[in-house]
Image: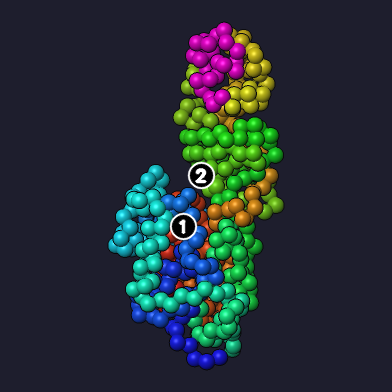
Amino acid sequence: MKKSTFDAVIVGGGAAGLFAAVQASARGRRILLLEKNSRCGKKLLITGKGRCNVTNACTAEEALKNIPRNGRFLYSAMAAFPPEAAMAFFEQGGCPLKVERGNRVFPVSDRSADVLNVLERALQRGGVERRQTTVTGLSIADGAINGVLTSDGPVACSTVLLCTGGASYPLTGSTGDGYRLAEQAGHTIQPPCGSLVPLVSPDEACAEMQGLSLRNTGVQLRDEKGKTVYQDFGELLFTHFGVSGPTVLSASAHLKPGKSYSLVLDLKPALDEGKLDARFLRDLEAYANRSMENALADLFPHSMIPVLLRRAGIDPALRANSLTRQQRRALLEETKRFVIPISGTRPVEEAIITRGGVSTKEIDPRTMASKLVHGLYFAGELIDCDAYTGGFNLQIAWATAHAAAQVL
């Protein structure tokens, strides 16, 4: 293969690939960016419901606490390029940012295209060459990269950065290509599955309450032994298949294959049991001659009341002034510990990000370099690291891309 005219080839034009190309070209490196889509950043454009949750306005240490899998691997990369550095990059590039609930960072314009435009302008300044092509393989000789194979022919190079994403949102181009390339190089792939993905429940009550969104709800994910493996507070949504929403998506990051789980909801977390019971008594007295189905209208959403009463063993037509102390206790139990059995997750194609990928044990955490093949690097979702919602996964992309770009 003839000598390369490029210092490095980056495979994949998503968040990590674009940012690595920007950072490396700013160092004067000659970069070739290969992307199979007709345009780069397709997944970036749809993140945050089209608003792009750029990062989280927290410290590097706080960001690492929101990465439940292999967070320690990212310590060096996150310290070198923390959230504040990501915010500064985009603001200096002409995209003003704002901080919302949970320290989530968005463009002031609420347009993900503005984030992508910052990267596009930086690519042009850096003279990054782009080609639309599909990478079909790596050319490796004597334990080192000497080129990539594409649908348009081979490209000679001694340095390759794989930023091909995971397996979620396949319509954006994340179809697992990078896993095959990494495996070809001898790397171990932790089985990809969905993370930040809605959860499936066999409980028909979920479908009965389909479309109901709850706010300010306490959420616990418990394993088959009853141990709480994750807890949160915020929003969730009942669907025809189970549950979704921010708290549920974050909880999904803790599911392990082959284990059983349940969600335990506290529907009134602001009230302890004593205050909740007192509230029940006030409402029951105020609506003494109404049916229980109507007497609870001030406390619970309409579609949830029949489910709560059924679970508590209370006839919806029962007069409020006829409710026994035992029945009131049962209603309190359901309110504070509303259990939803979980049978699994929705398909990885519906996940926001992918859990799994190239084993972190085979990657240098300071440079993202392969420990197996000289000249091979990784960044972004392809690596086996994933985080909660709130901008943390894009922060992983920026930090790992920055780390690799310093040595390309």
Residue 219 lies in quadrant = top right
Q: Residue at x 52, y 34 (%)?
A: 214
Q: Residue at x 53, y 58 (%)?
A: 386
Q: Is residue 384 above or below residue 330?
A: below
The extreme front residue here reads 38
Mark found first going from the N terminus, 2 or 1 = 1
Q: Residue at x 56, y 91 (%)?
A: 1
| Left or right, 287 with reference to 345 | left
| Left or right, 179 with reference to 202 | left
Q: How many marks?
A: 2
Which x, y percent locates residue 266?
54, 32
Give the magenta range: 280-302
Which x, y percent locates residue 78?
41, 63
- The three-letter code of the residue at mark 2 reads Pro
- The three-letter code of the residue at mark 1 reads Leu
Circle 2/circle 1 CB separation < 8 Å: no
Helix, strand or loop at mark 2: helix
Q: Is residue 235 above or below residue 391?
A: above
The one of 14 and 357 positioned closer to us in this rendering: 14
Label 2 belongs to which residue? 246
